[in-house]
Image: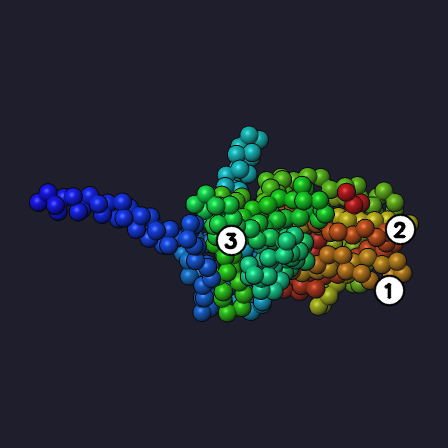
Amino acid sequence: MKKVIKYISALKPMLVVMLLLSACTKDGGYHDVKDSNSKFSGNTYEYLKSKPGVYDSLLAVIDRVGLKQTLMDSNVTLFAVPNPSFQLAIKNLNTLRRQSDKDPLFLANVDGVQLDTMVSYYIIRGKRTTDSLLLQDGLDLYSVRFGYPMHAKVSKIPASGLTGGGPDIIEYSNTKRSKFVRNWSTTTTGSNNINTSNGVVHVVSPDHIFGFDEFVSRLTFVLPPPNLMTLIGGKLTVLRDNDGGPDNGEGSKKVIDGDDHTKFLADLQGRLWMQFELNEPAVSGVYTLTSANDAQERDPKAWTYEGSNDGKNWTELDRRSNFFFEERYQTKVFRCANTQAYKFYRVDITELRDGGLFQLAEWTINKAK
């Protein structure tokens, strides 16, 4: 018996060495994280639908602003925002509104223009897996609807005490149209490279606040810059006027009279533009539209905002579709990246909410910030 105990005692150091070697062989000294690539047989919209309780808010916004078809048939990369990100954004907004004794807002009734702009930050043209984002400085990306500049860069998180030994994450940034990184707003992804039939999905971390740092500021109304129509003066013309003429009670002159309780009413007939010739060229980076008193089906739904210096050759400055006013007498402020001075500006309307009779209370063209 003493010989057996002595024999086992002699083996103990060898057993310890073998166990240590086995442990080091198993993980190579760090966690070998598996690639997060996965394949989903349907399109990107169907992928979101397949995750009930995860992307309900994102789906509601996509449906509301008319991006469903884009996620079904276009080659896109989606940075998918989970429900907690929207909950944080809405909570922050309504905390501020309570301080001003205002009723709470929800995704169904917040400003649709701003919601459209913000959700577009997360939908990028083309398929972008992490492999395509491995450049040292990352890659500039552009949103599918407005061509808004975003940026993505792959990095690794630490694991087992080894810097860069963990899984890939994407640092996804709203550049705010600035070349200086310090001005960007950045979030990260929690998982990457979910391949659908028409795109790639990267999942944004749930502690991200939807809209980056713009959700509250965009949904708190800020007065637009000065109106160039009154600041400089000029002349209004329209493609088609009210049957009673421009001076009629609902003629075209009512759309620039500064009174949101009057309106311009006319037949669309497939297209109707309103044009204003300034007395001298000026830069407009903002314009506003105000809904009229009744009949929401007459509201404009799709249009372009354009500039020209001869009234014949036009440059598109902004494009909107699937738009709607939430209320009557509601002023919407639209911003574009124009830096060129034009003498002529126009809104070219191509679609109404329903029917063929167009109406609008007010239109202004405003200075750039």
Please state which amino acid type lies under the numbered disc 3: Asp
Residue 66: where, in percent of width, then height? 57, 60
Q: Nearer the viewer, residue 307 or 289?
A: 307
Please state which amino acid type lies under the numbered disc 2: Pro
Q: Which residue is mark 2?
A: 281
Please state which amino acid type lies under the numbered disc 1: Lys
Find the residue positioned furthest to the left.
1
Instruction: State the CA–CA distance, disc 2 to disc 3.
Output: 50 Å
Say whether residue 256 is left or right of residue 11.
right
In what element is the residue under mark 1? loop
What residue is rendered at 53% in x and 37% in y? 92
Q: Which residue is mark 1?
A: 312
Q: Which residue is mark 3?
A: 168
Q: Quadrant of residue 272?
A: bottom right
Residue 168: where, in percent of width, then height? 51, 53
Residue 191: where, in percent of width, then height? 47, 54
In what element is the residue under mark 3? strand
